[in-house]
Amino acid sequence: MKVKEPVITIDGASGTGKGVVSQLLAKQLGWKLLDSGALYRVLALAAQKHGVALENEPALKVLAEFLDVQFIATEMGRPPKILLEGQDVTDTIRTEKMGNAASKVGALPEVRTALLSRQRAFREAPGLVTDGRDMGTVVFPDAELKIFLTASPEERANRRHNQLKEKGINVNLGDLILELKERDQRDRERAVAPLKPAEDAICIDTDKLTIDQVVERIMSEVRKIFPSLHTVKE
Ligand code: DC
C-alpha cells in the first residue's frame, strides 16, 4: 500500500488570515502549498473569458475538467505565479468580484467533483499545507492535522480592506462588509461541502492574535504530531 504524504488543512472564511498563515506554515515546514480558492477563482475567470454563465453547471463542469491552469513556484514561501491558458492571472483573480464569482461556481456540486482529483494531486513529498473551505471535511478527510480559523466579520472586513489597499485596490469598507456577508452565507449554506470545521478540527479564533502567533499556535500542534520534524526556519 502506498504511504500517503502528510497533510495539514487550514480552513476558514475569507479574512481569517488562512492564506498568509498557510504560506508561512508551508515555508517553515518546507512543504508544498495548495491554495484551493485560487482554483475556484481561476475557474470563474475562465468562465468569464469564454462567456459561460456562472449558473451553467454542465458547461462549468466541462470547463473545470479541462481547465488549463498552472501554479508556477516562485520564491520559497511566496505565492506562486498563476497562469490560465498560459496567461498570467495572479493579480486578476484577487479582486472581490472574482472572489464572489468563485463562491458562485463553488456552490455547484458538479464543479466541486470535477476539481477534486486536481486538488488531491497536490499531495506530494515531503508534505502538503492546504488553504480552503472544505479541505479537512471533503478533499483531505484523512489529513494529519486540521485547523479551522475564525474571526469576527468586522475584523475580517478590516483585514481584507488593508490587504486590498496594499495592492492599490480601493474598495469601500461598507460594501466590503456586505459582500463578505453575502459570500459567507453562500459558502456556509451551500448543499455540498459547506464552510464548516471538520469534527476533528482544532478551531482557532484569530481576532486577537497576530499572524505569527497563529502560525506558532499551529506549529505547537504540528510538533505534537511530528515530534522529530525538521523545520526550514524555527
Ligand atoms: O479563499 P478564497 O477567498 O480565495 O476563495 C474564493 C471563493 O472560492 C470562496 O468564497 C468559495 C470558493 N472556495 C470553495 O468553494 N472551496 C474552497 N476550498 C476554496 C474556495
Image (cartoon, grey):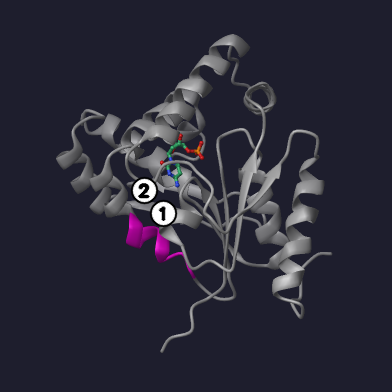
Is residue 201 on the magenta stretch?
A: no
The quadrant in which the C terminus is found is bottom right
Magenta stretch bounds: 116-123
- Choose the circle earlier in sequence order: 2 or 1: 1
Would you name the residue on which mark 2 appears?
86
User: Which secondary structure lies at badge 1?
Assistant: strand
Q: Which mark is residue 70?
A: 1
The answer to whether residue 219 shows anywhere in this view is: yes
Residue at point 50% right, 40% down? 90
Disc 1: CA contacts within 10 A as few (<14), some (14-19) or many (>=20): some
Q: Is residue 155 above or below residue 106?
A: above
The residue at the point 50 percent across, 27 percent down is 95
- Rendered-image quadrant of the N terminus: bottom left
Give the CA separation, mark 2 to mark 1: 8 Å
Type of residue at label 1?
Gln
109 left or right, relative to 33: left
- Amino acid type of the residue tagged 2 in the rendering: Gly
Q: Are the residues tagged 2 and 1 within 8 Å (C-beta)?
A: yes
Picture residue at 62% right of the left edge, 67% below the top: 31
| Number of numbered discs visible in the structure rendering | 2
Q: Image height check: is 70 above or below 16?
A: below
Q: Is residue 67 left or right of residue 220?
A: left
In this rendering, which labeled residue sits more in front, label 2 or label 1?
1
Is residue 66 visible to the viewer in this orientation of the structure?
no
Give the crowd class for mark 2: few <14, some 14-19, many >=20 residues within 10 Å: few
**In the current view of this chain or complex, which residue is farthest to the right?**
234
Q: Is residue 126 above or below residue 33?
A: below
The picture quadrant where one finds residue 77 is bottom right
Residue 178 rendering spot, x and y as whole percentages: 52, 15
Prevailing secondary structure class for the magenta stretch in the rendered image = helix
Across and down, in percent, residue 104 comes to 34, 31
Residue lying at 58% horizontally and 69% vertically, measured from the top left: 144
